Amino acid sequence: MINELFAEIKDIEISKSKIRTFISAFTIFALFVVVLVFKISGGFRDTTIVLLAIIFMVGMWRPMLLRSFYKITMAGSISFGFFMFKSLLIMIYYLILTPIAVIMRLTGTKGLENGTINKNKISYWVTVDDCDNDPRRVEHPY
């Protein structure tokens, strides 16, 4: 699992166009956050805007100068996504599926054929009409 994460981080494609796209998105997002934060706090710093403008210009004219920043940021986002996905699956399991199973067990619902299990039955397979089992029907399904 961790090896897959490291392999994905190692395979990050670094090209001028990828870095330019990343820097464009990064500066737009950072500018939005800066304006929002400073609007809420009441103060506004021109130096932050100037720094973002410098990062944007360097990223557009000499994108390979920012390749280490790109690689570190992308590795961080891949790692964050990897662990957040696992955490989300765990939360879904324990917060949604487990309570449903506990409620079904407390109420005695089994989930098969109106909650009853027929021990004499070999299978719960639902049979269909013979016309549906005709192999010619899959030749032209539409």
Image (cartoon, grey):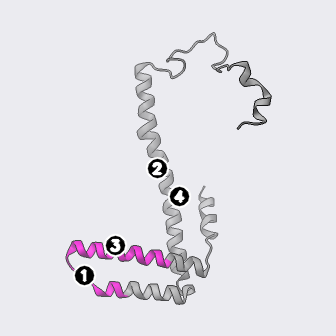
Q: Residues within 10 Å of mark 2 (few under 14, many from 20)?
A: few
Give the image location of residue 15, x and y in percent.
62, 79
Q: Is residue 39 magenta?
A: yes
Q: Label 4: which residue?
A: 82
Mark 2 element type? helix
Label 2, label 1: how far apart the Cα atoms are? 37 Å
Amino acid type for the residue under numbered disc 4 = Phe
Q: CA distance from mark 4 to mark 3?
A: 24 Å
Question: Which is more toward the observer, 98 or 54?
Answer: 54
| Magenta-tinted stretch | 23-50
**Residue under circle 3?**
33
Residue in view at x 52 percent, y 74 percent: 72
The mark that comes first in sequence, 4 or 1, is 1
Identify the residue under disc 2. 88
The numbered mark, 3 or 1, whose residue comes first in the sequence reads 3
Say what amino acid the circle numbered 3 marks: Val
Does 25 sit left or right of 129 as displayed?
left
| Residue 70 picture location, percent across and down | 53, 77
Say whether disc 4 or disc 3 marks the residue closer to the N-terminus: 3
CA separation in Å, label 3 and label 2: 26 Å
Q: CA distance from mark 4 to mark 1?
A: 36 Å
> Which quarter shows the N terminus?
bottom right
- SS of the residue under disc 3: helix
Q: Nearer the viewer, mark 3 or mark 2?
A: 3
Label 2 near label 4: C-beta < 8 Å?
A: no
Q: Nearer the viewer, mark 2 or mark 1?
A: 1
